[in-house]
Image (cartoon, helix red, strand yellow):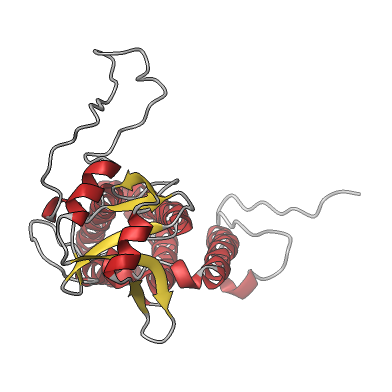
Amino acid sequence: MEANIAVNSDKKETWSGGGVKPFGASYGKMMMWFFILSDALTFSGFLAAYGLTRFKFIDSWPIADEVFTHIPFFHGNYPMIYVAFMTFILIVSSVTMVLAVDAGHHMKQKKVATYMFVTIVFGLIFVGSQAWEWKTFINGSYGAVKTSDNHILQFVKDGHQIALADFVHNERVDGREEHSRKNGLWFESEGTISQYSVGQVQRAFESDPSLLIRTERINPETKQKIILSREESIAQLAKATRVVEGANLIENEYGNPIFADFFFFITGFHGFHVFSGIVLNIIIFFNVVLGTYEKRGHYEMVEKVGLYWHFVDLVWVFVFTFFYLV
């Protein structure tokens, strides 16, 4: 039985032998929609896993307003401000992408190139901002200690969290030195050690009676972390085994380490999508400048990459909601 395949060299039809085009879409656009659907299911699975895990550990989950408080070149506490800026940049980039697609429908080459260039710039700002946010999250803000039963203890004064550097001023007396290539043979298996030792933190805490301990546990009524009394604080601090500065896949000074695992994985996966979209936009941008699509008589490639870019923007709305707002 011969396959029913029709080839028309004059009209270059992609769909052939199958009747009308599905939804009036070309083969390339239909395949982009299939990819977007499969990718949407992937992100849905990740976010569903995040939601279930957060619900399970809701009493020790970090509070977003206490984690994402930084703005580049500014010192202070600005909860969610920079994340909101990143979101705004990505949404505006989606608008410029729409304008590029619309200009393509009207065969306006210069406008397509201009709007695509602006979209690329906004995308680079977003990816750069996300890299800065990762760096800030990894380095940490305040520092904390980890107890023998794997709980995180933070430090407060006058009801506000303070950094280790704000009250630990005594010298480290344990003689501990981080091994490196130049001074030892253990550098291959040893991670970076903390700037402060547990004993150093304990002595500084005991010498300042105004300091208290704040646990990673959240009071369900106030939605704030529980602050211990002075006696309870000293008792809990005696269990400290390690100083934690910043967040990684094993430890997290802000609370439950699983939060950091999900944060790095999901925001990193989305960041990879944005970076891929930037690369695609750059390729299409140069094709626009060279007049490739003018010669073809249509700007469908701009429309297809626009679909991908809008999808990436929409996914960020859900990531932003799950990680930063809820």
Q: Residue furthest left?
A: 74
The residue that appears at 15% across and 49% down in the rendered structure is 168
Considering every residue shown, the one lying at the far bottom of the view is 221
For the image, the number of numbered tags is 0
Which residue is rendered at x = 28% and y = 55% of the image?
A: 130
Occupied quadrant, residue 16: bottom right
Q: Position of residue 72 (x, y in %)?
A: 13, 57
Image quarter for residue 161?
bottom left
Task: Specify whether residue 100 is in view.
Answer: no
Residue nearest the viewer, comparing 73 with 14 = 73
Q: Is residue 319 visible?
A: yes
Q: Is residue 289 left or right of residue 54?
A: left
Q: Determine the image quadrant of residue 221.
A: bottom left
Residue 172: percent from left, percent from top: 18, 35
Q: Find residue 204 and report its horizontal and vertical position in percent.
A: 17, 51
189 over 240 or under it: above or below: above
Foreground of the two, 108 or 222: 222
Residue at the farthest front position = 231
Q: Nearer the viewer, residue 189 or 104?
A: 189
- From the viewer's perspective, is 140 left or right of 279? left
On the image, the x and y values in percent for residue 322 come to: 43, 72
